Amino acid sequence: MKEEKSFVKEITPQAEDFSRWYIDVIRKAELMDYTPVRGCIVFKPDGYELWERIQAGLDRRFKETGHRNAYFPMLIPESFFQKEKEHVEGFNPELPWVTEAGGEKLEERLALRPTSETIIGHMYAQWIQSYRDLPVLINQWANVFRWEKRTLPFLRTSEFLWQEGHTAHATEEEAREETMRILELYRDFVETEMAIPLYTGQKTPSEKFAGAVDTYSIEAMMKDGKALQAGTSHYLGQNFAKGFEIKFLDRDNQLKYVHTTSWGVSTRLIGALIMVHGDDRGLALPPRLAPIQVIMIPVGPPKFRDKVMARFDPLFDALKAAGVRVKSDLREETPGWKFNEWEMRGVPIRLELGPRDVDSNQCVLARRDTGEKITVSLDEAVERVQALLEEIQRNMYEKAKAFRDANSHLDVDTLEKLKAHIARCEETGELTGFILAGWCGSAACEAKVKEQTKFTSRNIPFDPPERKHTCIHCGGEAKHTVWFARAY
Amino acid sequence: MKEEKSFVKEITPQAEDFSRWYIDVIRKAELMDYTPVRGCIVFKPDGYELWERIQAGLDRRFKETGHRNAYFPMLIPESFFQKEKEHVEGFNPELPWVTEAGGEKLEERLALRPTSETIIGHMYAQWIQSYRDLPVLINQWANVFRWEKRTLPFLRTSEFLWQEGHTAHATEEEAREETMRILELYRDFVETEMAIPLYTGQKTPSEKFAGAVDTYSIEAMMKDGKALQAGTSHYLGQNFAKGFEIKFLDRDNQLKYVHTTSWGVSTRLIGALIMVHGDDRGLALPPRLAPIQVIMIPVGPPKFRDKVMARFDPLFDALKAAGVRVKSDLREETPGWKFNEWEMRGVPIRLELGPRDVDSNQCVLARRDTGEKITVSLDEAVERVQALLEEIQRNMYEKAKAFRDANSHLDVDTLEKLKAHIARCEETGELTGFILAGWCGSAACEAKVKEQTKFTSRNIPFDPPERKHTCIHCGGEAKHTVWFARAY
């Protein structure tokens, strides 16, 4: 991710080069900037504000379900990673290390956290003594580091922001309930607030979190047909409890290991938001998440400006008082320039008011999602705006879902069909999308599919649209029905 | 800061050992825990929640004054520190360094940020081209690192949490206005919400921020008479603009360097809160900041519990509906145990309701700040609680101010008098507190005072209670009237 100073003039069309489109959009909308630090970006105010809105929505839900925030050290002693075998193998290659501090070489290297199961596990071992101390339900908002080879803004960067929940429970049942409660919380937030339709399900063993017993995920389809894992919830069993000696005296007076969970979503969600809703004109933000829901622009010749503003200002105040996130653009640029600008930035509704509108006691609402323009009476403008925001939210979800469903293939369920499907897509420019296929449960079969098609298992949906009975690769009996796709 | 597992049974009295008292309180109230990572603590949920409330109050004020949040990389290339001479000298000895990542040795070491002027300066140079791009008003909430030799929970730790504002302006005047606007914002927040009285003023050159032209601070007095710098606001002049080439084309078509500011408060504020208001019974939280404002406890024999709860529950709901942060404690422990517990945790009001109270249509409000118990009618309990919260807030500020004033000495204004003052304090157990004295402006005089008394200049108050005319050390003409104290 090298530093570029180029100013984005035109957004490359999605059909021409989706990757270029993505970079053009996020730079033109000023969501991020490159930095001289390898693989690290700046979250500029308009990008960070999307994260703040995601944080607010999730934090409220975490607290409503009994979780509390805390903050643990970012630096993790090397020896901690050795305590859970799979965990160290999974994360070791990606760690940055502090080896010197305060002018001295450290005796033990300290890793920049890639995730905090280890240090939190160590602390929980001190805090948990008895069943009365359980459950422990803690979340942390933090920066994390994974020194990835290939980086992509928001999706894969050396440093990123996330939340990580870490809970400890007396029984497997309770821990599994928590794992699923959070998966459902994520699904609800992402579908309801971000208008992103999801496939929820279980990861296959080869795709699960390093150290987990079971990993569950929410998977979304981007507009290029590729999958993006948007959040994960892990049942960790007693793996970390045993590694860090997290034991408690149960009601039956037996000393037992706790069962733990962990779960996280990150600034990746900003990437998902852009690639699910954006189009050739730029960003498109769902009303519930949009920092600005309505942009108000006065139109018509300057000589009528006073007349227009006499109705414009009270309408602005009325919208604000009604709780609408409204902003006015009174700059000197032309209305046409402003229309493009705010469309590019993805504001759901543009409200235009000109002198003739004032004469007719009306204003114009332009929808970002459909391009439609609606003339409404000024007397009912506030209610119409509120209703339209709901309608846009609903429509954006439905549109994304229709797209997702149209590119989810239920009949491509053998390796041969998949290869033919990919060949056809390459010819026609169709998207490869998701395919639903059976899987025998063998990691070798999964690996072969990946090797030959770059399709990876996304998850095993709880409620697949249909059951598949033969493995996509070996043709043997299918133990699971699985979504496969090329993925970010 | 080594890991201790000891459970705090009794809180050491302040008069016996203030440092021990402080550690006892923060551990017993479960605000923090030690970790195996040198100088790093865990902010446990009850401690982190104080930070969340500080964040909410400040973030709202930042946004109301036109600032927006962003996020910059935590890792800073070594070469960046070389670009501002004083800055590198000030921070270099305290930096932790990443030297390896992803299995390879890095070509250039990366520092864990101690503050972000350098990386932000670098980015501002890309973003700012014209006067139209100014001012830039950005804040960041982040973790920062300073590898200090001696650490103390919340006050001085290897990693801590803070906000850092970084602004760029076209003129010195605007930048200086911003510097003072933020100092006033900090003063207002800390005095109004945290009930901590402050001395605001300018730092002497030897105590200013490394790289600043002028540093201003808010200084508070702890209950052991020592000073704590609670926040700083810096006018950086064109120092960083020149180091990082942050230039803009002005209205007059001249290419000019911007003027920058930076300002920050940190999780130190949690330490200040504890050491200003706490007492031998534990924490005492001012109502506006307290996560729990009222703890409701049913009292009386268990056989009357149903009768009590019939009035208890509606009162709880009524308080909650009125916006009071109320919690009920229905555990099986005795009321006496609960009273102690919530007093120790600093909840401003305890509300007791027993069967005889129900008969008399009343409840009892116990104040944490004065110990006073007030009987009020259930019919007006909500309003009485609300009024009492305001009264406690006011009283806690007044009490802290009276203490601060009583330990601020206006007549100890020569080195001889200061030594006598210290000797007397050592004999009587009085606190050394703050002293107001003249200063000729020479760094040598300031250093001598520090060397001989451990008193350091805190700040040059804008509006000192009186003007001093001779230097505390050399007896020459005083250029400034200065607060001195021993400090954290």
Image (tube, coloured by chain):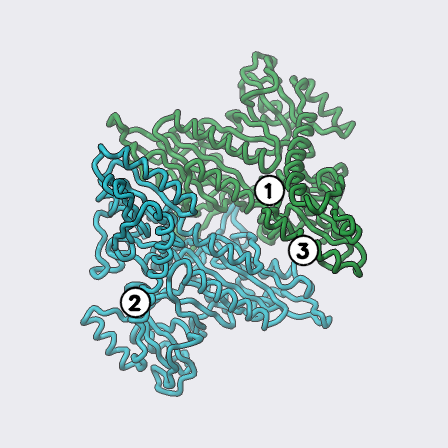
Chain colours: A green, B cyan
In x, y percent, where is residue A390? 63, 37
Are the residues under badges 3 and 1 in a single subunit? yes
Query: On residue A149, which mark appears?
Result: none
Pointers 1 and 2 in contact (C-beta within 8 Å): no
- Asked if one can make out residue A483 in the rendered structure from this viewpoint, the answer is yes
Q: Mark 1 points at which residue?
A: A289
Closest to the observer: B325 or A23?
Answer: B325
In x, y percent, where is residue A337? 77, 52
Disc 3: which chain?
A: A
Pointers 3 and 2 in contact (C-beta within 8 Å): no
- Horizontally, residue B363 falls left or right of residue A112, namely left
- At 60% from the left and 52% from the top, the residue drawn is A45
Image quarter in which the C terminus of chain A is found: top right
- Asked if one can make out residue B37 in the rendered structure from this viewpoint, the answer is no
Q: Name the residue under label 2.
A: B403
- At 27% from the left and 82% from the top, the residue drawn is B416
In x, y percent, where is residue B241? 60, 67
Are the residues under badges 1 and 2 in a single subunit? no
- Seen as rendered, the residue at the extreme bottom is B476
Type of the residue with mark 3: Asp
* Residue B421, above or below A8: below
Dot 3 falls on a residue whose secondary structure is helix
Closest to the observer: B311 or B326?
Answer: B311
Disc 2: which chain?
A: B
Q: Name the residue under label 3.
A: A313
Distance, label 3 to label 1, CA atoms, is: 25 Å
Distance, label 1 to label 2, CA atoms, is: 48 Å
* Residue A461, above or below B264: above
- Horizontally, residue A15 falls left or right of residue A70, namely right
